[in-house]
Image: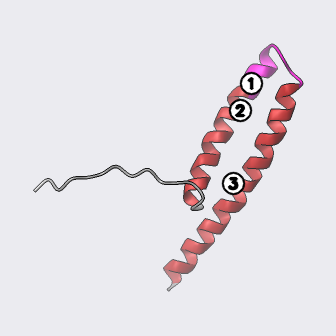
Amino acid sequence: MRGVMIESEVRHSARVHAGLLDSFIALTEAELARHANGFVEESLRELLETLRNERRAYGVIGGVAPVLMPVIENAA
């Protein structure tokens, strides 16, 4: 039964992290809108890419994003 509790805690934690990432993504997008050219824009775009990748990972862990599983045929 402890395994179910841990799984629930991990999923809850992932949802909290995902929510924080959503907020930080929105904040970064707003900041990006104020910097049209140059290094700051490039840096913020790279940060957004990293944040979105992290967000996808937490979405899968938290059970709020689909997990794409390959189909494995029986090799026997």
Secondary structure beneath dot 2 equals helix
Q: Residue at x 60, y 66 (%)?
A: 11
Amino acid type at circle 2 is Leu
Above or below — where is 76 with respect to 37?
A: below
Secondary structure beneath dot 1 equals helix
Real-space CA distance between mark 1 and mark 3, rounded to the nearest whole angstrom: 22 Å
Q: Residues within 10 Å of mark 3 (few under 14, many from 20)?
A: many
Q: What range is drawn magenta here?
A: 34-44
Q: Position of residue 13 (x, y in %)?
A: 66, 64
Residue placed furthest toward the bottom: 1
Amino acid type at circle 3 is Ala
CB under 8 Å between discs 1 and 2: yes
Residue at which label 2 appears? 47
Residue 18: mark = 3
Q: Position of residue 60 (x, y in %)?
A: 55, 55
Q: Residue at x 78, y 21 (%)?
A: 41
Q: Residues within 10 Å of mark 2 (few under 14, many from 20)?
A: some
Residue at which label 1 appears? 43
Q: Position of residue 17 (x, y in %)?
A: 70, 56
The numbered mark, 3 or 2, whose residue comes first in the sequence reads: 3
Real-space CA distance between mark 1 and mark 2, rounded to the nearest whole angstrom: 6 Å
